[in-house]
Image (spheres, rainbow, N blue to C red):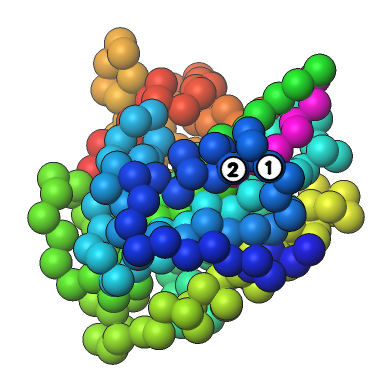
Amino acid sequence: MPIGSNVIFFENLPSTNSHASNMLRTSEVPEGTIIRASFQSAGRGQTGNSWESEPDKNLLISIILYPVMINPEDQFLISMTVSLGISDFLLRHISDVRIKWPNDIYVNDDKIAGILIENSLMDNSIINSIAGIGLNINQLRFTSDAPNPVSLRIIKGKEYNLDECLTELSDSINTRYIQLLEGETGEIRNDYISKLYRLNEWNEFSDVKSRFIARILTVKEDGLLKLECKDNTIKEYSFKEVDFIP
């Protein structure tokens, strides 16, 4: 079933990802089903971060997938695929869309979307994947302490139809997911790396030991970020082991 063929809408949910997870525990859910909420009272981002969104302003969705063809060690491909689908949608409307490793979506230096991928594994296989997406569409004012949020409306100065945006977004992610299903993993990886925020640009980073200047060389197949430092040493990091310094 193509992504977005089945959309289940709620005015208010604690979290679309949590609702999708509960559904998968109690029923058979068609692949590509989207759980959509106008408002999330406990929306979740990466590593427990919250996601701010006014009611009826943005797209808050979770997509249920069954990427059983992907080995657990390659599960970062799912994150790449969804990130590229969102980027493809945004590039229909704006330019300079980048993916900040691992899967925040940026326009220039501002964050327009966040992704939370939750994979369920059994017997060394991925049995299902929930792709949670928060995409800022029409919100004009952000009140949380997030440093750099932006929306399509702020960028373009016009209001967007959320239903039409969801249809476009679903189509874009579905196209990328078909690539994944058909084994075009090399193209997915290459496209993802080419869209990385600050790729090959010298930038300040920090880890648990120090601050340092480095540049992004690539992202490895397992999702590790590979950096080259000014002294030509190479460092590799998992998510949350290193931070960009603005």
Q: Secondary structure at mark 2?
A: helix
Q: Secondary structure at mark 1?
A: loop
* Residue placed under numbered mark 2 in the picture: 23
Q: Quadrant of the N terminus?
A: bottom right
Q: Of the residues shown, which amino acid type is indicated by label 1?
A: Ser
Disc assigned to residue 89: none
In the rendered image, the vertical position of residue 215 relative to residue 167, given as above or below: above
At x 40% / y 85%, what residue is drawn? 161
At x 69% / y 34%, what residue is drawn? 75
* Residue placed under numbered mark 1 in the picture: 27
Q: Is residue 74 magenta?
A: no
In the rendered image, the vertical position of residue 185 relative to residue 22, given as above or below: below
Q: Quadrant of the C terminus?
A: top left
Q: Position of residue 174 (x, y in %)?
A: 70, 65
Residue 195, picture quadrant? bottom right
Query: 10 Å neighbourhood of mark 2: few (<14), some, or many (≥20)?
Result: some
Magenta-highlighted residues = 124-130
Image position of 162 (left or right of 245): right
Query: 10 Å neighbourhood of mark 1: few (<14), some, or many (≥20)?
Result: few
- Distance, label 2 to label 1, CA atoms, is 6 Å
- Name the magenta segment's main secondary structure: strand
Residue 106, picture quadrant? bottom left
At x 41% / y 78%, what residue is drawn? 162
Q: Position of residue 163 (x, y in %)?
A: 47, 80
In the rendered image, the vertical position of residue 138 relative to residue 221, given as above or below: below
Q: Nearer the viewer, residue 162 or 238?
A: 162
Q: Position of residue 122 (x, y in %)?
A: 76, 21
Image position of 216 (left or right of 150): right
At x 11% / y 55%, what residue is drawn? 143
One can see residue 105 in this view = no
